[in-house]
Structures are given as structure tokens and as C-alpha cells.
Amino acid sequence: MAKELNFTCSACGTSFGKWSGQCDACKEWNTITQSTALASGPKGKSLGAMRGKTIPLTDLDTQEKEPPRTYSGVGELDRVLGGGLVKASALLVGGDPGIGKSTLLLQAAARFARNGLKVIYISGEESNAQVQMRARRLGLEKSPVMLASETNLRDILTTLEAEKPDLAIIDSIQTMWADNVDSAPGSVSQVRSSAHELTSFAKRNGMAVVMVGHVTKDGSIAGPRVVEHMVDTVLYFQGERGHQYRILRAVKNRFGPADEIGVFEMTGKGLVEVKNPSALFLSERGKPAPGSVVFCGIEGSRPMLCEIQALVAPSPHSQPRRSVVGWDSGRLAMILAVLESRCGVPFTGLDVYLNVAGGLRISEPAADLAVAAALVSAREDAALPAEAVIFGEISLSGALRPVVQTENRLKEAQKLGFTTAIVPQQAKQPAVAGLQMRHADDLAGFVEDVFGAR
């Protein structure tokens, strides 16, 4: 029987009966590719007309044991995984090329192997000699990790079935080739089929599998989005090549909290976990300078201090530049508009540059007040006190809103030696010894109080 052909959008996974230039679901262009159905039943018969097996049912009150976990011994990795590696789970790790995904997973494989797990590392991009060379550079050549270099999925599954490992690492899913799918490796149908086969095999055999995924230019994992729905955990390995810091972020985790992060430092001997990220991100901060503000954010379950830097300069162009690194450019435009309309601080004719030091990326709105302080500080050429930490959300009316976990933020700031905290007036007033609280009702009052300009 001829296999049924369909067309799938690589951006959103929607299927179509014919090709078109634009996806009707997500409106992306040139993302629809031809794929082949994995299997088809008897022609002319629906699934309801064919008998299947009865599915066992249970109720919500049934007490199930928590899945057993294995700790790697790397605190930052175990934190992101939610407390260790879960048996019979599927993980997807994405990141930019050269960011250190293979280094991280090789180090993790060695740690798990030393803790008693049987680990197989299968590379579809490098030979065994290349992986062994990296292992020698990292000092891991004596670790009991088994290696293989293969892209044929059928051979890989046969080997895993024979060896019965506790953990298998596939580097990468885009290089896998399933011979029952009529398309090239890396295509939508190949990635979807390979991920499905590996995930199903892991669940059936009680094996944990980690798949490496390449990312597109916008930072999302390449291939159909359905792959992220198949797996239990999706991790992104992020960082700037110019910085030595790397951040492992969980964006999905069925066995632990999402948005948890682990911080690593890239060294000549591989990745080293950073147990106190706040101190590391502030270690290169010198004397107080205009445009420099310390912000205390929440990443997952941990408070983290970082430096927000701003530079404001006259623009030689008719349209001033707005350049942002580590923050949302749309939110920067909103803060600039509020400063100009509610506080009378104009930025017309000025280039604005904003940077989050250390390669960290901030997404929470609690950074609004720190960003506004950095912008006004740079514009007025007035440095803020070095011992002050700032956080708070700004509304379009110019009012300041309290943020979550205020007490945890303040305790982290006090622990690192900060003596002053500038927060919204409505925030709860936790008592933190040695930390002076300064409050502001709105953005205009904050600008007047701190900079003496309104």
C-alpha cells in the first residue's frame, strides 16, 4: 500500500493536504514541508471499527509512588532536573552551536556513570575518536561511559535493547535517520519519527534518554514543536560566546519546577558549576558609574542579583537607535514612553543602549524600575549608590506595583552586603536586618527623590 503523503509546518506542527507558501495557523512563510505518514491502517476502516485492547483505569485518589531519581552530584544540574534524573524519562536539550551542549552532557554522563548507572553516549555528529579527545581534555577518559558513533535509528534501538543501559544520550536528534521514513535526516518527519521512537523505547524499557536538539536563528529548537510535547523535560543551554557563563534553563519539566536555572562557568577543563551566581555576576562591578544599577530577580526558585547597564548618547541619525541585550526590546520602548510622558524625562534624539551584564537574560517585569533607574542615571550622568538594589514593576500610568518574593530578594541582597533597597510603596515590609528600605509611590516620585529631576 502506498504511504499517505501530507505537508507539515515545521514551526507549529499543523498538517495540510497540499503545499502552500504560508502556514494558515501560525502565519509563518516557507515552513511547510512534505512528510510521510508513519503508518496507516486497513483502507476504508476507521479506528472505531477495529477492536483494540481495554485500557486500565484508575481514580485520582490512588497513591502512586514518586519516580525514583538518581543524583549526578552536580548541584546545578540536579536543581534544573527537579532533584535528579528520573528513570524512564525523555529529555530534550537545545542550545546554540558551540555553546557547550556536548561538553555538558559528556560531563553529566561521566558523573552518572560513576554513580552506578550504565551510560551509553551515541554521537551522530562526531566520531568516537573526537569524543574521546574531548573526554581527555576534560579529564574524563577513565569514566565508565560506553561510546558509539551512529545515525541509523534501527541499529541504535537494537543496540540499546541488547545493552539495556540506564541512560542513553543521543547527540543529536537532527542527525538520526529512520529507514521507514522517506525523507532526508533533519527533516520534519525524520525528527518527529526519531523522537517518537526514542521516547517510546525509553518508556517501555525503563531507560532515561537525553536528546540534543539544534536551535533555529530565533532560539527555538529546530524541527516540529510536537517533539517538545513528546518529551518530559525541555532544557535550553544559553549564554553569550563572549562570556564564560552558561545558563541551563528548564522551560518544561514534568518532574519538577519549570523556569529553574543552573549556572555554569566555561573553563579550560570544561563546565564548572557556580554555587553563588549573584556574587559571580557582580564580581566585575567596579566603582559606581552612571547607568549602572543592581537588580535582584527571581530565576526559578532562587533569587539572583545582576547588573543592568545603560548608555544614553546623542544620536547622529534621524531615528535614534534602541539596542538591547538580555532584555525585551518592546518593554524597553514602553519604559522610555512612560519616562517621557509621565515623568517629563525626554529621550528624543538620543541613542539608548541597554545591557544585562554577564550574558544573563531577564524576562520578569520586576526589572522595570531597575531599567528606568539605569536609563535616567545614564541620561543625567548621575551614579546611584553602589550599595543600593532596585526592583519593581511599572504600569503605563507610571504607578509602581509590588513583585513576588520580595522577602527572598531582600535577603539575597543583604547577604551580599547591600544596605539599601528601593522598592514600590505597596510592597510588603519584611524585616531584614541591616537593610534600609526606601519606597516610591510612582515613577515620577522615584525620579524626583533619587535624581532630583522631574
Image (cartoon, rainbow, N blue to C red):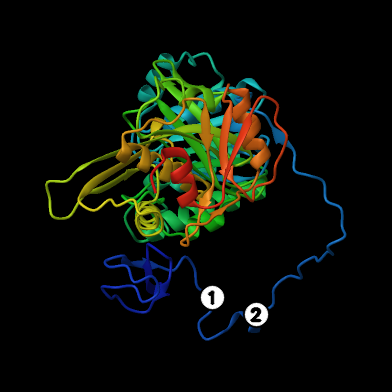
Element marked by disc 1: loop
Looking at numbered disc 2 in the image, what kind of residue is underneath it? Met
Q: How crowded is mark 1: few (under 14 residues within 10 Å), some or many (20 or more)?
A: few
Residue appearing at x 62%, y 38% in the figure: 81
Q: How far apart are marks 1 and 2 (CA)?
A: 10 Å
Q: Looking at the image, which is closer to me, 453 or 108?
A: 453
| Residue 292 on image: x %, y % | 39, 32
Residue 164 in view of the camera: no
Residue at x 51% of width, y 24% of height: 107
> Residue most toward the bottom?
44
Badge count = 2
Amino acid type of the residue tagged 1 in the rendering:
Gly
- Where is the N terminus found, in terms of image quarters? bottom left
Q: Do we see residue 56 in this rendering?
A: yes
Left or right: 20, with 142 as reference point: left
- Compared to residue 234, the image places residue 23 above or below, namely below
Q: Name the residue under label 1.
A: 41
Nearer to us in this view, 327 or 149: 327
Residue 141, x across and y down, in percent: 48, 15
Which residue is under mark 2? 50
Q: Percent from the top left, x then y, of residue 314?
A: 18, 43
Q: Name the disc covering residue 167, or none.
A: none
Residue 331 locus on image (x, y percent): 40, 54
* Tag 1 and tag 2, C-beta contact below 8 Å: yes
- Whichever of callouts 1 and 2 sits on the residue coming sooner in the sequence is 1
Compare residues 93 and 146 and report the one nearer the observer: 93
> At numbered mark 2, what does the secondary structure look like: helix, strand or loop?
loop
Residue 450 sits above or below residue 288 on the image? below
Specify few, some or many for label 2: CA neighbours under 10 Å numbering under 14, 14-19, or 20 or more: few
Q: In which quarter of the image is residue 262?
A: top right
Residue drawn at the location 30% of the way across and 40% of the way down: 379
